Amino acid sequence: MVWNASLRNIVVQAAHIRGFCKGRVQLKDFRWGLDARLAARYRLSRKFRAVRTMMVDKGASAEPGTVVDFLPEKENLENNGCASGGWRSEDGRLSYGYSSFRGKRASMEDFYDVKMSKIDGQTVCLFGIFDGHGGSRAAEFLKEHLFENLMKHPKFMTDTKLAISETYQKTDMDFLDAESNTYRDDGSTASTAVLVGNHLYVANVGDSRAVISKAGEAIPLSEDHKPNRSDERKRIESAGGVVMWAGTWRVGGVLAMSRAFGNRLLKPFVVAEPEIQEQEIGDEFECLVLASDGLWDVVPNEDAVSLARAEEEPEAAARRLMETAYTRGSADNITCIVVRFNHDKAE
């Protein structure tokens, strides 16, 4: 009886995640009698996703200088903790999909943002993953302000790398100022990709990660900021901080990453200065994967690229990555963005 009950829980749990995040449910497969309320919640989730997709498609064309936000202002994650969506450019050459799942955590601290604009005749696309720790306020602040601040930077188009670096650090200071009267000490990672024409800038703070597929090969475009990295440990200790073992290597025995937004109590040892890599996107590049560490904890770079390339649509690829991380035992929030470069396709 105990074994049957455990098996029933596993099957219902598997049905739960696939029902909400895969976009299709076959009730005949739910042999343990799926609760009617769960089926109703699935139908509501599917209706919500259809409305979101319509919103995305209608925003595909933008006037020069207009910023188009391809995400709804508020994501309703209260019912099932899962959201997904996607978009394709008018010429079909660029598409993206995202998937975000609360997973086994009691609360959701992952946020993500996608924006597009035309500036000086160039199409600019911005993608971001923000993984909060100690609360969600820092990650939510980045979603609301980081890309807006970046596009307002006077050198955004002429010196994009400098603009990204200065905007990251200014936004960090803005967040600390906004939280100066609170007793919270939230922090957040940021892994962002800025595509200006065919030129890609990937900026990273923390242990979220970006990986690109080049002719099927997984190439990391960021390196996790861990306290035991020799260069990071040297920087921390030179600033007067300490790195110690507390289950894993931690700054001051507290934080398991060496760079982050927020974390006022660990300044100046934990900084929001990004490491930036540049890449010209040629025909050999297929797709880009951005994700929080809820994916990377259990899915190696090579697996992520292989899974993403196996799906025709990037939204399906993002959902598959999220589901794979969950079934492999990820205990964290899981958020993925997959950007596909369709060099030879046009609608």
Image (cartoon, rainbow, N blue to C red):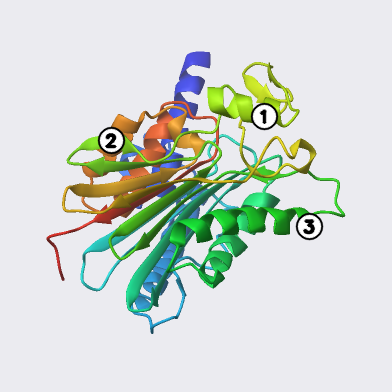
Where's residue 113, x and y in %?
A: 50, 59
Tell whether 42 sits left or right of 309: right
Few, some or many residues within 10 Å of mark 1 (<14, 14–19, 20+): many
Amino acid on which the number 1 mark rests in the picture: Ile
| Front residue (pair 116, 60) | 116
Q: To which quarter of the image does residue 332 belong?
A: top right
* Residue on which the image places disc 2: 218
Mark 1 vs mark 3, CA separation in Å: 23 Å
Amino acid on which the number 3 mark rests in the picture: Asp
Secondary structure, mark 2, is: strand
* Residue on which the image places disc 1: 236
| Front residue (pair 49, 346) | 346
Q: Which mark is residue 177?
A: 3
Mark 2 vs mark 3, CA separation in Å: 39 Å
Q: To which quarter of the image does residue 300 belong?
A: top left
Q: Which mark is residue 203?
A: none
Q: Earlier in the sequence, mark 1 or mark 3?
A: 3
Query: Residue at horizontal 35%, vertical 52%?
Result: 23
Query: Residue at horizontal 73%, vertical 39%?
Result: 268
| Pointer 2 with pointer 3, Cβ within 8 A | no
Where's residue 9, x and y in %?
A: 49, 28
131 w.r.t. 74: above or below:
above
